[in-house]
Structures are given as structure tokens and as C-alpha cells.
Amino acid sequence: MKDKVLHRLDLEVMKEVWKLGQATVNDVLDHIDRKLAYTTIASTMKSLEKRGFLSYQVVGRTFLYQPLVKESEFSHSMLSNLLERFFDNSAEKLVNTLLEVEQLDAAEHERLQQLINNYQPEGETDE
């Protein structure tokens, strides 16, 4: 999965297909946040199919696309790639950069702190 990259429109389309579970070109057009031509979405979905992100079945005269890659699998792969390439595999560097760049409100800061406090690495349990 490391070599699979999604550009902006690819990712927008995949997010809609993941959300819907399966989708036609018109389904994506109806849900995407910006005005695009039918042919643009159709070409993008065909490209995603050729690259192994989507499969399709023909229902009547319509192509019904399904994701071949889970959203969580893809996001984990991209985050691992980002962590490796930009942060020398250091979660601490990534979080520090995130905190420097993002303006967190008190509630979000508290939620992040709770996530860190409650996190248990795999294989470790409370005694």
C-alpha cells in the first residue's frame, strides 16, 4: 500500500465511496462538496479502479463502484509514510509539530490529553 498515493480529487471521491459503501458516478456527484463535471468524476473513478482502489459491477447500464481498500487501512498507511518521511519515525516530533501548527481550543486539548493518558501500547495491560 505504501506506493499508493491519492491526489486531492482522488481522495475526495474515495471518501464519498467509503462513506456510502458503494456508489455510482452520480452518487459521488450528489455528495461531493464542489461542482464538477460528470466526466471528471467518471474519469477519476475509472482511474481509481485501474489503480486498485475501486472495483465495479455493472447494474443495468450503470457502473456501481465498491472500495477495495479500507479507509482505515489507507489512512494508517499514509500516516506511517508521513511519520517515516518527515518525522524520522518519531511520534513525538509529529505531535509537537501538530501542536505548533494547530490552534487547539481547551476542549480539544483536554480530549488529546485523555487519549494520551488512556493509551496502552499493544500487549500491555493494566495490572
Image (tube, grey):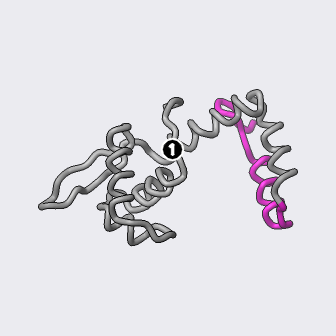
Which quadrant, please, contains the C terminus? Answer: top right
In the rendered image, which quarter is residue 41 located in? bottom left
Is residue 106 inside the magenta stretch? yes
Return the x and y of residue 34 as percentages of the image width and height.
Answer: 50, 69
Looking at the image, residue 30 lies above or below residue 103? below
Residue at horizontal 50 percent and vertical 52 percent from the top: 11
- Residue 106, by quadrant, is bottom right
Q: Where does the image place residue 114, in percent across and percent down from the top left? A: 78, 54
Residue at 29% in and 61% down: 24
Q: Is residue 52 left or right of residue 81?
A: left
Along the line of sight, the residue nearer the viewer: 64 or 6: 6
Residue range (magenta): 103-127
Q: Residue furthest left?
A: 60
Is 54 contained in the magenta span? no
Task: Residue type at mark 1: give it.
Answer: Leu
Name the residue beneath numbered marker 1.
6
Q: Count neighbours of disc 1 (C-alpha within 10 A) and say few if under 14, some if 14 to 19, many if 20 or more.
A: some
Question: Residue 57: x, y in percent?
Answer: 20, 50
Residue shown at 14%/61% (left/top)? 61
